[in-house]
């Protein structure tokens, strides 16, 4: 991430360096197997489960990481839990990806509330329990592509955001949805540094927010969401760069105008409002044509809309994707 003018280059880990340094040491042989055959990989190397101790989520109809082949899940082998929970972007805690887990270890989400407000017939401040009761938890194995050029396969737990939005009955003049992360520098020590303008904010067009792929995630790998991944509730839009997936949400507001978004505001020439994964539109400082899949050697081609073109390309019919990046 990192906007060019705010963070010294010394703080930026080039994804390629990172993976040359660590991933090959840890998982080189296993990763080679994974490339050869994902299925064998999964049988021989059950995914790591010992690195987080958040509670298991009851009521899942499919066991975590089962190969689910439907419109919502990909069949690629999931990235290890260890990588998913120890290589994070969450600037409210740390700008060091490998330091987020430790920096967020004591984050307390007790009494969490989410306000769903704005242009809706039935605005409501939800307790987390009420929010989670809106729809049964589903497991969705999604691709995740960070704008920095790395990617993972993450078995999320959650439900379509549309379920929540429908519950509050959007008014016809609601055209966008604005999201906000908790603002609390006591509990989120990274907010004491002005690396970004706090709180972190994101936004979607109404039709993007209502798309069934758009997930309100409350867990991963069958467990409650670890702090470092955005506890207790975060957004996941798998056809967009990872920064759209705002973490630890406290406010969801339906609005008439396109809301401001944190990274777009921080570096408008580098991060657009739409942020759709697009291998043909490069970041000003690096190519977006390929990506480093965590746990895999080498780079693989990046897919248009991160492989979800069939489901979402229609949302952008007629739009200039270079101008609306
Ligand atoms: N949400 C908040 N509130 N703060 C952040 O720093 N980082 C974003 C996104 N959501 C971020 C955030 C970025 S840049 C990415 S790539 C993803 O979270 C990373 O999610 P992960 O750590 O669960 O992989």
Image (cartoon, rainbow, N blue to C red):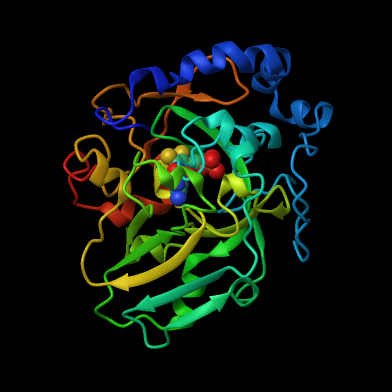
Q: How far from the left and from the top, in percent, is residue 92?
A: 47, 45
Q: Look at the picture and state if 301 lies above or below 187.
A: above
Residue found at the very far right of the displayed protein:
44
- The quadrant holding residue 307 is top left
Labels in figure, total: 0
The image quadrant that residue 281 belongs to is top left
Task: Pinpoint residue 238: horizontal percent, then vertical percent.
Answer: 47, 47
Q: Is residue 118 left or right of residue 212?
A: left
- Asked whether residue 262 appears in the rendered view, the answer is yes
Q: Is residue 310 left or right of residue 223?
A: left
Between 46 and 187, the one nearer to me in the picture: 187
Q: Position of residue 224 (x, y in %)?
A: 69, 56
- Does the image show residue 143? no
Q: Is residue 236 left or right of residue 305?
A: right
Front-most of residues 309 and 256: 256
What residue appears at the point 69 percent right and 33 percent down from the top-left corner?
Answer: 82
Q: Quadrant of the C terminus?
A: top left
Figure quadrant of the N terminus = top left
């Amino acid at each position: 991430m990192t906007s060019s003018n705010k963070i010294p280059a010394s703080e930026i880990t080039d994804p390629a360096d990172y993976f040359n340094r660590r991933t090959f040491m840890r998982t080189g042989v296993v990763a080679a197997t994974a490339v050869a055959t994902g299925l064998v990989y999964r049988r021989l190397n059950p995914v790591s489960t010992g690195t987080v101790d958040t509670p298991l989520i009851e009521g899942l109809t499919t066991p975590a990481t089962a190969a689910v082949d439907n419109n919502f899940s990909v069949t690629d082998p999931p990235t290890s839990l260890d990588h998913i929970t120890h290589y994070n972007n969450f600037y409210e805690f740390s700008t060091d990806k490998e330091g987020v887990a430790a920096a967020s270890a004591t984050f307390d989400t007790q009494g969490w509330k989410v306000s769903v407000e704005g242009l809706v017939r039935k605005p409501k401040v939800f307790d987390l329990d009420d929010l989670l009761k809106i729809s049964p938890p589903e497991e969705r194995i999604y691709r995740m592509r960070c704008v920095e050029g790395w990617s993972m396969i993450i078995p999320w737990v959650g439900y379509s955001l549309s379920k929540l939005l429908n519950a509050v009955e959007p008014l016809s003049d609601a055209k966008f949805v604005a999201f906000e992360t908790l603002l609390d520098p006591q509990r989120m020590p990274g907010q004491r540094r002005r690396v970004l303008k706090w709180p972190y904010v994101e936004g979607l067009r109404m039709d993007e927010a209502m798309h069934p792929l758009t997930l309100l995630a409350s867990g991963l790998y069958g467990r409650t969401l670890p702090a470092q991944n955005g506890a207790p509730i975060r957004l996941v839009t798998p056809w967009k760069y990872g920064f759209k997936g705002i973490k630890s949400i406290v406010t969801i507001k339906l609005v008439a105008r396109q809301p401001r978004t944190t990274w777009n505001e921080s570096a408008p020439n580098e991060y657009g409002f739409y942020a759709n994964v697009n291998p043909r539109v490069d970041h000003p400082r690096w190519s977006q044509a390929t990506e480093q899949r965590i746990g895999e050697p080498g780079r693989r081609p990046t897919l248009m809309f991160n492989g979800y073109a069939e489901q979402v390309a229609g949302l952008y019919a007629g739009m200039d994707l270079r101008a609306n990046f």
